[in-house]
Amino acid sequence: MQPEVVHPAEGKPMNFTQIYFGGDYNPEQWPEEVWAEDARLMQQAGVNLVSLGIFAWARIEPRPGAFDFAWLDRLMDLLHAHGVAVNLATPTAAPPAWMVRLHPEMLPVTADGVTLWHGSRRHYCPHNPDYRRYARRVAAALAERYKSHPALAMWHVDNEYGCHVGECFCPRSTAAFRDWLRARYATLAGLNAAWGTAFWSQTYTDWEEIEPPRAAPAQKNPAQQLDWARFTSDSWLACFQEQRDVLKAAAPGVPVTTNFMSFHRPIDYFEFARHEDVVSIDSYPDTSDPGWAAVSAMTFDLIRSLRQGEPWILMEQAASQVNWRQRNAVKKPGVMRLGSLQAVARGANGILFFQWRQSRAGAEKFHSAMLPHAGTESRTWSEVQALGRELPRLNALLRGRAEAQVAILMDWNNWWALELDSKPSNDLKLLPGLRAWHRALYRRNIPVDFAHPESDLSRYRLVIAPHLYLVSDAAAANLSAWVERGGVLLMDYFSGIVDPNEQIRPGSYPAPFRGLLGLEIEEFVPYSPEGRNSVLTADGRRFETRFWADVIHLRGAEALARFEQDYFAGSAAVTRNAYSRGSAYYLGAELEPAGLEWLLERVLGEAEVQPVLAGLPEGVEAQRRADSQREWLFLLNHNAFPVRVRLPAGGRDLLGGQAVGGEIELPAAGAAVIETVIDRSRP
Ligand code: GLA
């Protein structure tokens, strides 16, 4: 039996006809004389899509209900005349000052009761009915005005939901939380049981007694906090959905998106993505970190996974530096191009920037842009122009998908629960674990998806489950069934501990996976920052461990490595359990990187997973996109020196425009996209 996909996407995937290239365009910051130059330079740079009006609410609706579209009409026409399509934004991430004055209770309030005022952006409570009414109204006015404009290509709703203000604790939010809880539990008895309120006399006898998890004297109820996180995530989605519905009612065929923010804790992106027509993401790796490309690869692998591999859009990246780090590194020559091609390699059909023209005023005036303060006589402009000329060469691969045989499990519910306080170690966070596995696979050029634990895993040979602390019955059954059918599972410590109410699953740890893993865990042993242990593997390797150790009793699994120190010396640290047609590995320690490599080598071998290309020089990234007829091998040289790469087959380098044989030389920071026709006669 195939498990059901729990996150089926709504609607049809967006139909791309070209690779989009452009950025956020904020013309309201400039006198009108500049617009003509903008349009001319956009054309020169090959820009074919801009996200327009994202923060222009005060200009679009200068007084309540009085819309000024004349300037936007002129811009839409101007852009269209220059071949630039518009991703028209609803400006609802920056409510105007008049609205705040009329409805000061729309301002968000922190857990400590502090109000966040006007004077920046995203200063709204997602539950405020006045704000929501105004947001629907401006979206409807824009939709009505521009639904048939030939420049309109898609809608961009709001901007980075949950950014800056992830949650709001005002009285409206409190009332909305109570409504959400009533809908979830129906009865107070149900809520009291789910929240375990017998503990510390927290029992509720009236819905009005329930509050958000505000600042409190000591640890807060974990189930209350978890439901608060779910409620908050649902609230941002509701804000999006009602605008989407307004836009769809006016222009049913125009795709709707909102820009996501990498691994962003306040919102369950798996759930959210289902309600968009195409997913898009903003990515700002710190390129002063030599490992930046692994960071952005992880972001891109997440966004591709949210709608099961459909093409997506890189909605924002920096042409060079950002303004919001302590020190804002430039993107050195070639780096912006490499990062852009990396996104296409991992499934993007659009490469856009924040922003088109660098601001002269405001908080982001030192943030780079496609057109910098230095103007067209600049390195950044040259690199932007060159990329704009180059991307159309890749239009052939719009329907090509980047597929993976390995998945790392990711569930926002687990993320929220794992990082609540009062754990054996409060230093255990989800992302470092995800990153460690992803990075190890990235370095081997093995494509990876992120998969929800309840989703259909049948396309994967290897599934890695880092710290899957909270697990539903459906997810546990899904994983066991997938291993039964022959999958290779690698689970690591602190998995299978609580149910979706954040309550310990009965029986010894890890209750839902004991049979699958063939072991029981008696206790968790977190270490101080200086604490160390080591493991000796059955094949004679020794690796240091730190941070965490599980005291494991084998119940059928074999030990692949055993601890060498502490009172549980000699007990298993790494195990393998043959389970029906598959096998389940378990790692009960924090292994040093060389140890992770040793373990990966073994599981990849058993799962028969191959890299995109074997034998690549260090620092060369390889990814593949393919449709039914052709495949495209992306080679990105992240080194500051040239490398030679041996190719499995000759083809045509779409970037260089020439045929390549059995070998190709990539210059420093160079790239190639080699197109080959798939030989269907091969098995
Ligand atoms: C985010 C926002 C943009 C801009 C950039 C700056 O991605 O969506 O409006 O502020 O950050 O890096």
Image (tube, helix red, strand yellow):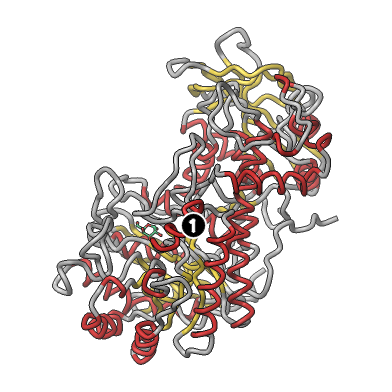
Residue labelled with disc 1: 103
Residue visible at 81% across and 26% down? 506
Q: Determine the residue located farthest toward the top in the rendered image.
A: 567
Lateral position of residue 302 relative to residue 234, left or right: left
Residue 255 appears in which quarter of the rendering?
bottom right
Q: Position of residue 56 (x, y in %)?
A: 38, 70
Q: Quadrant of the C terminus?
A: bottom right
- Looking at the picture, tell me which residue is in the foreground, 413 or 630: 413
Identify the image quadrant of the N terminus: bottom right
Q: Does residue 396 sit above or below 537 in this rendering?
A: below
For the point 45% across and 68% down, which residue is it? 91
Q: Look at label 1 and name its amino acid.
A: His
In the rendered image, the vertical position of residue 319 relative to residue 223, given as above or below? below
Residue 116: x and y in percent read 42, 46
| Count of numbered labels shown in the rendering | 1
Ligand 1 sits in quadrant: bottom left
Evaluate whether residue 354 shows in this view: yes
- Residue at point 81%, 23% (across, down): 507
Is 577 on the left or on the right of 463, as rendered?
right
Whether residue 581 is visible here, answered yes or no, is: no
* Viewer-side residue, 55 vs 588: 55
The reply, left or right, for residue 668 in relation to residue 344 is: left
- The picture quadrant where one finds residue 400 is bottom right
**In the rendered view, does 450 fall on the left or right side of 666?**
right
Q: From the top left corner, tell me how far across and down residue 517 is, in percent.
A: 74, 32
Task: State the image coordinates of residue 38 (x, y, percent, origin top left).
Answer: 26, 80
**Secondary structure at numbered mark 1:** loop
